[in-house]
């Protein structure tokens, strides 16, 4: 099972859509989770292009003004979508594998940029995770760091960092290790600030279902965020 998580920073331009299509053609993800689409709707033809012509279930959340927006897709050949849900900062799919009938949850998140909204984000996500008995995987752009080393400068909010780590502990999640790159975001300045904002977490039971899972940090293209590929 391959799952793509990517803060694409806008999916309106033809060039950015082409980058997504080429990325999907290269890596063939069976689930696609995008953040910051900044799109209110999608045409069936463009969604079909993202899926490379394979049958996919799609769902999206429109942006809040000129930022945000989520898009999630899952291959109908591999999973059946039983329940679709969303909150302010996440969207989720209750999935069932076609091959072994195992049920699990996929959660796509986009954490707020504003510091004063981040406790609300963590609480909403914690409530969602604690409310389900399903094995789950949750990923996306959390807009939070877990340790000082997650940022190239020492300017970190220790209160929010502690709150993020407390959330991970209460939700009983484990962060999947990434390969290929130290950071996942850059501000693209001459003296760039870089951070780890994009992450993938799993429950222990989900990792039991996919014991050989790993996360690749793919080459950054177009967006200021690296795509993450769970494989």
Image (cartoon, rainbow, N blue to C red):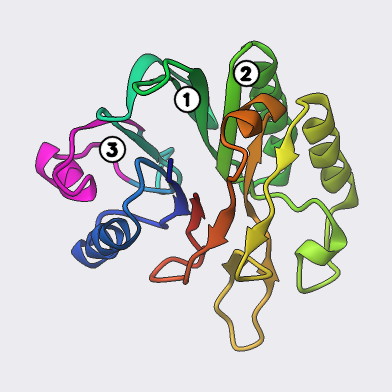
In the rendered image, which residue does mark 1 sit on?
A: 92
Q: Residues within 10 Å of mark 2 (few under 14, many from 20)?
A: some
In the rendered image, which residue does mark 2 sit on?
A: 128
Q: Where is 168 relative to 50, above or below?
A: above
Badge count: 3
Residue closer to the observer: 101 or 217: 101
Q: Which residues are magenta?
A: 39-60
Q: CA distance from mark 1 to mark 3?
A: 18 Å
Which residue is found at the position 84% from the left and 53% from the top? 157
- Residue 97 counted in the magenta span: no
Residue closer to the observer: 169 or 110: 169
In the picture, which quadrant includes the N terminus?
top left
Work out which residue is located at the far left of the displayed protein and give it.
45
136 left or right of 229 in image: right
Q: CA distance from mark 2 to mark 3?
A: 24 Å
Q: CA distance from mark 2 to mark 1?
A: 9 Å
Q: Where is 207 relative to 152, above or below?
A: above
Which residue is found at the position 25% from the left and 30% from the top? 77
In the rendered image, which residue does mark 3 sit on?
A: 40
């Amino acid at each position: 099972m391959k799952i793509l998580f990517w803060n694409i920073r806008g999916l309106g331009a033809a060039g950015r859509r082409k980058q997504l299509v080429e990325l999907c053609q290269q890596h063939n993800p069976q689930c696609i989770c995008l953040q910051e689409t900044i799109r209110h709707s999608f045409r069936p033809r463009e969604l079909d292009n993202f899926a490379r012509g394979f049958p996919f279930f799609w769902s999206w959340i429109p942006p809040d003004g000129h930022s945000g927006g989520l898009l999630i897709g899952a291959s109908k050949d591999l999973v059946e979508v039983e329940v679709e849900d969303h909150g302010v900062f996440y969207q989720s799919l209750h999935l069932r594998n076609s091959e072994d009938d195992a049920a699990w949850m996929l959660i796509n998140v986009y954490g707020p940029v504003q510091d004063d909204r981040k406790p609300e984000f963590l609480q909403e996500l914690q409530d969602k995770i604690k409310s389900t008995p399903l094995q789950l995987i949750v990923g996306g752009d959390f807009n939070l760091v877990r340790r000082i080393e997650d940022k190239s400068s020492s300017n970190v909010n220790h209160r929010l960092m502690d709150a993020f780590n407390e959330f991970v502990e209460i939700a009983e999640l484990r962060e999947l290790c990434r390969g290929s790159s130290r950071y996942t975001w850059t501000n693209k300045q001459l003296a760039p600030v870089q951070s780890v904002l994009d992450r993938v977490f799993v429950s222990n039971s989900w990792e039991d279902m996919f014991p050989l899972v790993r996360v690749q940090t793919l080459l950054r293209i177009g967006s200021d965020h690296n795509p993450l590929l769970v494989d």
